[in-house]
């Protein structure tokens, strides 16, 4: 996997945990494409089904949830991912509490990832959209699920260990951050990222017409590549790496 610091060995197993369908594809789909191309097994864990992500109140909530799960499944296939878990917590009401931590820890114990990728638990006061409460809660719950819950045999013992979910220690967590130290070159898979994102028809069709997603994401990724001191013309996604061994 190409990074700003040079080639980096791709982890064997990766789990991506986010709040909503399309969150992965805006910020991480290029990296996922690079990982699957390198032979990594990547799985997705969606805390909600995005059932609050539509202003048109004539669309039934359950139908919207089904639509968005189908869109996320299609998007995942564009970047080589076939394993998806939907936790069905309430969109807009995600809470970093024992129930969510337990549910994420269960998926970690099932997938046994070397790396978990998740959202930033820190509020960015310069970006309201970038600090969606569900994102903050998901990021913090995921980090707590990584340590200590997933590795501690006594954590949620009745729901996890006694049901056969053995403890697992994750080596690293990659988070979206305003202070990244890992810049992944996604130039060669940028088209795959766009196809994945455009699979979320209910969310991006109007945005694509209004903003030109290819141009917008190219400029955003180009800025990250520049921040990572990559050559001119490259496109990147960026993360802060936490050592959780």
Image: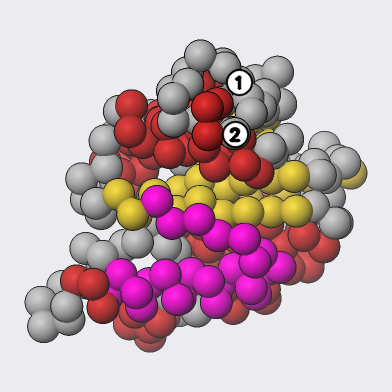
Q: Is residue 19 visible?
A: yes
* Residue picked out by circle 2: 164
Between 9 and 39, the one nearer to me in the picture = 39
38 in relation to 155, above or below: below
| Residue 196 coordinates in the image, percent (x, y) | 57, 73
105 in relation to 72, above or below: above
**Image quarter (top left, top right, bottom left or bottom right) of the C terminus:** top right
Q: Is residue 187 magenta?
A: no
Q: Is residue 77 magenta?
A: yes
Rendered residue at 59%/34% (across/down): 164
Q: Read off the magenta span.
A: 64-87
Give the image quarter of residue 185.
Answer: bottom right
Q: Main secondary structure of the magenta part?
A: helix
Label of residue 151 in the image: 1
Between 144 and 161, the one nearer to me in the picture = 161
Q: CA distance from mark 2 to mark 1?
A: 14 Å
Between 219 and 244, the one nearer to me in the picture = 244
Q: Is residue 55 left or right of residue 5?
A: left
Q: Residue furthest left?
A: 57
Determine the secondary structure under disc 2. loop
- How many residues crowd around disc 1 within 10 Å: few (fewer than 14), some, or many (20 or more)? some
Between 173 and 6, the one nearer to me in the picture = 173
The nearer-to-camera label among 2 and 1 is 2
Rendered residue at 33%/33% (across/down): 99
Q: Is residue 118 left or right of residue 63?
A: right
91 in relation to 141, above or below: below
| Colour style of the rendered protein structure | secondary structure
Determine the secondary structure under disc 1. loop
Work out whether mark 2 precedes mark 1 in sequence or the reverse, and give the earlier one: 1
Rendered residue at 77%/60% (across/down): 36
- How many residues crowd around disc 2 within 10 Å: few (fewer than 14), some, or many (20 or more)? few
């Amino acid at each position: 996997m190409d990074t700003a610091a040079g080639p980096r060995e791709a982890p064997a197993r990766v789990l991506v945990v986010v709040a909503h369908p399309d969150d992965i594809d805006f910020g991480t789909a290029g990296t996922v494409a690079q990982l699957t191309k390198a032979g990594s097994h990547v799985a997705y864990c969606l805390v909600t089904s995005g059932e609050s992500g539509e202003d048109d109140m004539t669309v039934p909530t359950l139908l919207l949830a089904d639509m968005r799960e189908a869109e996320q499944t299609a998007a995942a296939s564009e970047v080589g991912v076939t394993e998806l878990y939907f936790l069905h917590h309430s969109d807009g009401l995600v809470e970093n509490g024992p129930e969510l931590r337990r549910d994420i820890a269960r998926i970690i114990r099932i997938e046994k990832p070397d790396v978990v990728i998740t959202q930033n638990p820190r509020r960015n006061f310069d970006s309201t959209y970038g600090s969606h409460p569900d994102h903050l809660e998901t990021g913090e719950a995921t980090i707590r699920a990584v340590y200590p819950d997933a590795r501690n045999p006594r954590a949620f013992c009745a729901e996890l260990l006694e049901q056969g979910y053995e403890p697992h220690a994750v080596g690293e967590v990659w988070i979206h951050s305003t202070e990244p130290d890992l810049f992944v070159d996604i130039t060669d898979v940028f088209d795959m990222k766009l196809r994945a994102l455009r699979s979320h028809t209910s969310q991006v069709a109007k945005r694509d017409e209004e903003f030109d997603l290819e141009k917008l994401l190219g400029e955003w990724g180009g800025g990250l590549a520049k921040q990572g001191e990559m050559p001119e013309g490259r496109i990147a996604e960026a993360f802060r790496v936490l050592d959780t061994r």
